[in-house]
Amino acid sequence: MMTVKLQIVIAAAILVVFAVLINMIRRKSLELKYALSWMLVLTALFVFACAPWLLNVVSEFLGIYAPVNMIFFLGFCFSLLIIFTLTVALSRLSNSVRTLDQIVALNEKKLEELEQALEEEKAKNQNHIADNEQE
């Protein structure tokens, strides 16, 4: 069982982390879609810190022998969820970078072709001017 002092310390720590998370979202250093899962976990931890008897009720409902084991199991599941989410985001970014790289390569090729055509046109104009001067 948790003492009241420990409950207060844990709740205060959770509120500090929540405030840091909100500040990161406000400064746009963290996107809201990635922060929502962290907010959900912090909220659940805050509820369990304020009412530790709920931890026993939930662990018994899930058929887990010890409440501490339930916390570790849920932490493991949350870690897997975060890893999966980050893998999906990384795949999307990789595809976007590949597409952008191809677009840049095509634009560079077009730019080279236009520069070459411009140089040819300048050479024609200079030849034409030189021919007119000779006449």
Image: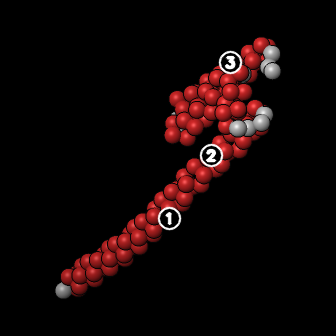
Q: Position of residue 113 (x, y in %)?
A: 37, 75
Marks 1 and 3, the one that precedes in the sequence: 3
Marks 1 and 2, the one that precedes in the sequence: 2
Q: Tell me the CA gap for discs 1 and 2.
A: 24 Å
Hey, what amino acid is under mark 3? Cys
Quadrant location, the C terminus: bottom left
Count of numbered tags: 3
Can you tell which mark lies on residue 82?
2
Q: Nearer the viewer, residue 86 or 24?
A: 86
Residues at marks 1 and 2 touching, judged by CB atoms closer than 8 Å:
no
- Read off the residue under disc 1: 98
Q: Residues within 10 Å of mark 1 (few under 14, many from 20)?
A: few
Question: In the visual, does 1 lie left or right of 73?
Answer: right
- Read off the residue under disc 3: 50
Hey, what amino acid is under mark 1? Arg
Quadrant in the picture for residue 23: top right
